[in-house]
Each structure stands twice: as C-alpha cells, then as structure tokens.
Image: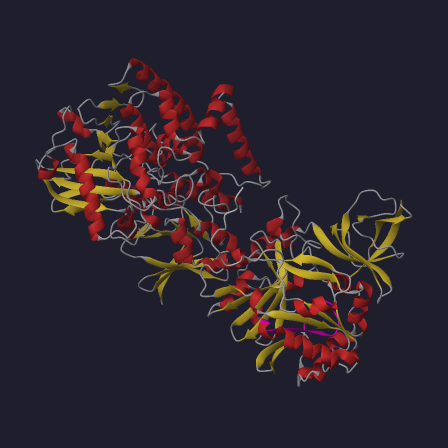
Amino acid sequence: MTIVQGPVRDPVHQGPLKTPFYPRVEKLDIVNQWHEWKGYSSPDALYCADLEYFAIRNGTAVFDLSPMTKYRITGPDALEYLNRLMTRDMAKIKPGRVAYAVWCDDQGQVIDDGTIFHLREGEYRLCCQERHFSWFQAATLGFDVSVVHETEEIAGLAVQGPTSFSVLNTMGLDGLDQLKPFGLTYFDFQGTELMVSRTGFTADLGYELWIDPGKALELWDALFEAGEEYKIRAIGTHALELARIEAGYLAPYAEFLPCDETIRTGRSRSPIELGLEWLVDFKKPNFNGRRALAEEKRNGSTWRLVKLDIAGNKPAHDSYIFPTAKGKGEIGFVTSATWSPVCKKNIAMGTVRTPHGKPGDTVWVEVYYQREMHWNREMAKATVVDKPFWFPPRRGATPPGPY
Amino acid sequence: MTKTMDSQYDAIVVGAGHNGLVCSALLAKAGKRVLVLEANDQVGGAAVTREFADGYSVSACAHLLYQLQPEVRKELKLATRLASEDMTTIALAEDGNHLRIKTNSVEGVSDEDAEQYRSFRKRMARFSGLLRKYFNKTPPRLGTRDFKDLMTLGQLGLDVRMLGKAEMEAFLRLIFMNIHDEVTERFESPLLRGAISLDAVLGTHLGPRSPNTMMTYLYRMAGDLGRTGVPVGGMGSVSNQLAHAARAAGATIRTGIPVKRIIIENGRATGVETESGERFDSLMIISNADPKTTLMKLIGAKHAETGFARRVSHLRAKGNAAKLHLALDGLPTIEGLSKKDYAERLVIAPDEHYVERAFNPAKYGESSPNPVIEMTFPSFRDETLAPTGKHVMSAVVQYAPYALKGGWGDEAKAAFMKAIVYTLSKYMSDLEQRITASELLTPADIEREFHMTGGHWHHAELALDQFLFVRPVNGAAQYRLPIDGVYLCGAGAHPGGGVSGAAGRNAARTILNREKAA
C-alpha cells in the first residue's frame, strides 16, 4: 500500500484546548487528574483536593475559569433584550454591577443560570457554564442588539479566600478596598485593561480577574508573586465543588438539568422550584417564561429545592429522601452532598416534591456507604435549612479585612 | 398619535380578507362592536375582482370557489351566484385528446383507469369528509388535561378508527405520502396522473414527489369534494356579500386604512395604530394578516417569548404560484374543445413528471421554463368581466418562486411571461395574436398587493408540520397568540387558505366560546 501525501493544510486543532494559563497551571500539577470542560482541559485537583479546599477557606485559592462560556451583549436594545431574556429586572443592574440571573424557556423552565456583568452603559457580558448561542441569537429577533460569543477572547481567574484582598492589594490594585460584592472595576495592568469583579463561586471574600489572553501569564506571575506570603494556591474543580455546596449555589446537571437537554416531562425545573423566585420579577410585562411562571404561582409548584443538614458524617451522595424514618414513599433525592469541613456538618442539596421540604421540616435520607467492601444502609435524619451553610461576614465586608 | 374619540370597540379586525369578514360578521351577529380596518381600497384581501386592463376585470388572486364551507354560507345566509359550477377539469393534450375529469368520473381514459378513478375518488371523499369535520373545529391543544381538548382529540382518534380497519390503515399510510406515488400506483394515463398531481400541489411550494402532497390533495377536496365554481362578478362578489353581511350585523368596515402596529401595553394588546397615526382602542385585536406579518411586523417579536417568536420566524411561507391575467380580443382556438368547454377549468400538466420537472428549478430559485397552468375564461359565462365579444383568461401558473434568484425585476418577469405564452401556445396556436393586455402577478407582487408574507396563498405552507394542532405553530393553534388580546383569523391559522371561511368562522367561535366560559 502506498500512502499518498495529501496537500498540506492548516492543522486543525485536535483534542482538548489549553487555556491561556495552562503553562502555569500545568507546572503546579502533581496528581495529573484532568477533565474536559467545554472543550478545555481543566484540573480536578493539582496536588491534593482537600488541601486546595483549605486554601479557599484559609488563604487564597486561584482557579482558572477561562473555559467559562462568555457572551458579549451590546447595542441600543441591550437592556431591553436582557430584560425579555432574563426573569429578573435588569434595569436595576447599573453599569459597574454584576447580577446573578436565571433564564427560562417559554414554559418557564430553567435553561441555565449565570452572571451578567454590566461592563459599561449598555454593554454586558454574560457568563455561564453551558453554551446557549442559538437561544440567545433567536432571542435577538425584534431587537437592535448584538450577541457575540467571546469565551476565547477573555482569560479569567477566580481569586478566592480570606487573604484574596490582601494579595490583590499587594499586587498594586489601588482602590480595590472600595469594591462592594457584585461590583466590578477596571485597572491598568502593564498597559492592558484588567477587569476585577467581586464575585465568585465560594461564598467567601473573593474576586474574579478578567484579562486579554495575551497578558494571562504576566497576570498569573504577578498574582503569585504578590500572594506568596498569603498562602496563595492554585486549585482544581474538586475543591471548588466543595465550596460551592457550602455556599448553596446551584450547578447545572446537579441541581437542575438545562431544560433544553431534557426529554421527559417533569425533569426540568422552574426558578420557583429552585428557590430562585426572588429572581423572578412579575412586574415586567413580558419575559421568557412569564406566562408559565404566573400559572405556576397560581397552581403551585411540583418541586422544591432543599438544603439539608444531615445527622452523622457520611455524605448522602445520590440518596433518596423520605418523609419518615421508615423509608417508604420517597419524596425526592439528593443532588449534591458533602461533609463540610468548615461548617463541621454533613450537608446536601436536594429536590423534593411539594408540600414537603419547608424550612424547618424534618426529612430522612437513605445513606449508603461501603465499609471493607460491604455496603451499609442508614436512615439519617435531616433538617431543611433556608440559609446557606457558609456565609461569613468577611464575604460582604467593605472594605474587606486585611487577613 | 391622535386619539380618536369614540374609539372603543369590543374587537378590531385587522384586514378585511374573506376570513376577516366572516369573523367580524359572526362577532357582530353575536352583538359585538366590531371595527374592521383594511389596508386596500377594496374589501376581500385576495378574494377580490379588479380591473386589470381597460374594460377587463378578473378575480385578482383567488379565482375558483371550491371550499366555501356550508356552515359559513348558512350562518351568514350567503346566496352566492355562480357563473360556472361543478366545473369539469379538462386536462389538455397537445394532440387534442383531452381528458374530462369530473368529481367521480373521468372521460378519455381506459376502462381500467376510469374504474380506478372512481374508487380513488370514493376513498378520497371518505378521507376528506373526515378532514372537513375538523376544518370546522378548533384543533385541540396537545399535552393538556383540558376536557375539551381531550374530547376533540379522542373524537379524532375515534373518527379515524371508525373508518374501519382497512381504511384506517390506508388513511394513516396515505396522509404522509406523496401524490406521485399514489397516481403512478393507480393510473396508467399520463394526463390523469398529471392533472391529479397538479391539484395536489397548486398554491404550494411542493412538487408531486414532495412529502405530504396526499394531504394537500385531500385539503383541496375538503370543501365540496373539490367541485369548482366561478362566482358571477368574480371572487370579489363573494367578499362583497360577506362585507354586506358583516355591515348588516353592525360591524364597521373601513377601507384604505393600513394598520401600522398592534399596540401592546403592559404585555397585552390595547388597540391598533394606523399608518396615518390614528389610534383605535380595543382589548381584542383579531389579525387577518398572516402569522409572520402579525407577530414580526404588527406586534413586534419582542412582545412575545423567544421560543414562540422563533417558531413563527421559522414558518415556511414562500409562495410559488403566479397569477396571470390576459385580455383577449376573442377566445383562442384549442383543438378538440367544443365551445361550451370554455366554461370549464383547463389544466396544462401533461404528466406527473412534467409537474415535478416544472418544480425542479423552483427549488433553486429559478422559474419553470415549462410551467404548470390552471386556467379559466371567466368572461365566457359572465359578461360583466369583459367588453362584448372580448374575453379574459385567468390562470394560476407554477412555478414562480417567491425568492427568485436575482429578484423579480422586469427582465425576470418578461422571461417568465415568455415561457408561459410559449407553453400556452402549444395548445392554443392563435393565443399570442389575441392578447391585447396582460398582467402577471408573481408571488412578490402578491405579497405587496395583498399583504401576505411570501405571496403564499395559505399564509404558511400547507405541510404536516404546519397543520392542524400546530398550525401555524405550536402555541398559537387555537386562534390565540400567547400575547393577551391577540387572535388570528386568517389562512395562516387552522385549517389554511382557500376561500373557505373556515379559519374566520372558527376564530369567531373560539372567541365567543371563551367569553361564555369566562
């Protein structure tokens, strides 16, 4: 067999993409555990997930969130467009502010949640986990607005933990102490614009840094140099996931499925069912899902998201939830669970059928655990709580403390 | 914007097409204060009679009456006078051996074909009868637990089952099929195959081999088994009668007033604004315009939810039928026709392949060099349409794609006109010298003159994915848009186009029933 060499073409990228910070992250990697995140390689952990977690709670943790999906929304109708797309009132989000938001299909079912950065007057960036270009593009019908997918154009770092302010302050970001939670501001970083927002996925004091990918490595180096005496550590997804559950934040494919990914009826969730009714503003005359959500308000919801404080120390992964210790008549299931080191509690989030799961209610979760190959089953008592498990005062303090 | 005094109406109907007139007449009869605003100077929409040349008039768009629902005639006490009725379809052959196709029989074919035609039409009559029943009902919503929806859906299932096992199987097989497969299975006569194929594709962007052309054939039959007639004075006389009925019932009809937009305030319709800036208030706006025009132009997509707006924007509505009007100084000679045959419906579709080949260029944005033609000489039995001794030809010519490559400029129109005359001349050698004036309306002209997106007769393609429960789209199939106070009553709504009045009547009934229920 002869192999004929075809014409030389531009190489097509194969395999996972590398983020702009990859050369630095890779250098710190010891355990070599990676997964794919929307086409990019992202580390599960770099040296030890547990220790990385403690960097979030006790020092400064740095997480590379460049693969986060980002869209730029601009044009004269940008606000009006977002107000129809999102359930909350976007007019309240002034330039320099960031909003957590959720968006629905016409049936009032959640497509995804994300954060919307009001960068400048009439100019927004939307960050979320999943890709939604087709939906966002369809939503432009009738609006003078442009939606551009810009994931690759911006490199992002989450800098989270009690000493994060001190690190950034040492790095020379003067005036950062005035930035309130969900605020954003700009700095000059070696001649390039650096956007810093006081946002994160950890419910702790923390910031997110956004910069042109061309300056990514310089930013990383400056950050780690400044952070040396503040116990700065790069982290992977496992540690962040722990912090997320403590914060009580939702994750797609855990607490809900993006509704456009569901086939069976009843497998998607509405914002009300996810405890996000505070994000639904019925005062707006029209937004996607309004009619259906108004009907749900009239007729009642099927599901309720619950945060559970569970007895014992065995994480209730994937457990069924029951109304009584007898374990009969299942009312729902756990969607995320962990032992919380910082709260010293066995915590979980789950979804239960209404009217079950009101704050203060007692429910029972069926915990399975393995001990020397053999499986054990335990009915653990759990209390429904309505506050996040972890929400320290330092998260909201402005100016932040010099830890 | 000036606010007119005394502008409070129970309902405003946008567009005085025949469906808008039926709807407003029925609402007015029920005691509603109805205002109808029509952009053109004449009522009727695409069902109008217009002078196209000095002394020559013609039904300017729709020219044959075959679907007007008996319920509409009865409820509005219409007495339509027909110049020609139960017309024979004459499938023209170049050699003069034409076929004469009637409702249940055909002349000029083998005994085998004649027998096959009888049994074919018997079955089609049974199936179209079933369809007709549902043409006059609001289609049920799918996936609800509403009693009425479930009943209608159950009834539909039962009706299909009641056809009997063999016929039910045939129905479920045929409804998705294309007409080409059915006619080639049944008939040997190319002319018969061609004529039936033409009936299935007339007014659509479909060829005989396109899916669901059996359904479009049945659709055509769902009026009076496809029996065609020509009203005295042209199609405009039907519209005038409807307008008369509406006015007699108390509706106000104003022509020459184009509506610029439907006003949406706080998420609901509150009135309309005209092009001249006049405002009329009503909490119920019924649009006779096509669904795309209604949502994208009159309301604005931003007032709907994204999923719904996307579905409407994806509606397929690209017309492919042109309308040709010829003023003739005498009847052209057609070999093999007797004088009285000029009162019938003549078609040029020599075989099923000819029709498909005529469609082929249309797929790629080109007009047919050998078009398919349906024609009548309405002046033959109706002297009001042309000066004494002179005649008018009214023809539907396919295919003339709306989105013609390069657009429908004068040159493109002239080229298509040439192809039409060339085709016609094969059957009527003296035609060209008899033409004293002509008018060719391409789908682009039809869109402009009759305000229908894509110049499509049906306002949205007749196809199974835009039919019945999902016509025009899921979420608006019950004549109501998911925007409070806005309704549809035109051809884009269930069941579809053709001068049937079904959509207008169903819309009125839905509105009145909802009020009763509330």
Residue A156: give x, y in percent of width and height. 64, 70
Q: Is residue B405 visible to the viewer in this orientation of the structure?
A: yes
Name the side, left or right, on which A293 lies relative to B250.
right
Name the side, left or right, on which B265 lies relative to A386.
left
Name the side, left or right, on which A292 lies relative to B48.
right
**Residue positioned 62% across, 68% down in the render:** A20
**Residue positioned 77% across, 49% down in the render:** A333
Span shown in magenta:
A199-213
Q: Is residue B12 visible to the viewer in this orientation of the structure?
A: no
Toward the viewer: A155 or A401?
A155
Residue A113: give x, y in percent of width and height. 63, 61
The quadrant of the picture occupied by the N terminus of chain B is bottom left
Q: Residue furthest top?
A: B111
Q: Quadrant of residue B176?
A: top left
Toward the viewer: B276 or B371?
B371
Toward the viewer: B411 or B106?
B411
Toward the viewer: B122 or B8?
B122
**In the depicted structure, whether residue B178 falls above or below residue A195:** above
Q: Residue furthest front?
A: A2
Q: Residue A209 magenta-drawn? A: yes
Residue B302: give x, y in percent of width and height. 47, 60
Name the side, left or right, on which A104 lies relative to B296.
right
Q: Residue A61 magenta-drawn? A: no
**Residue positioned 29% across, 19% down in the render:** B105
**Residue positioned 36% across, 30% down in the render:** B221
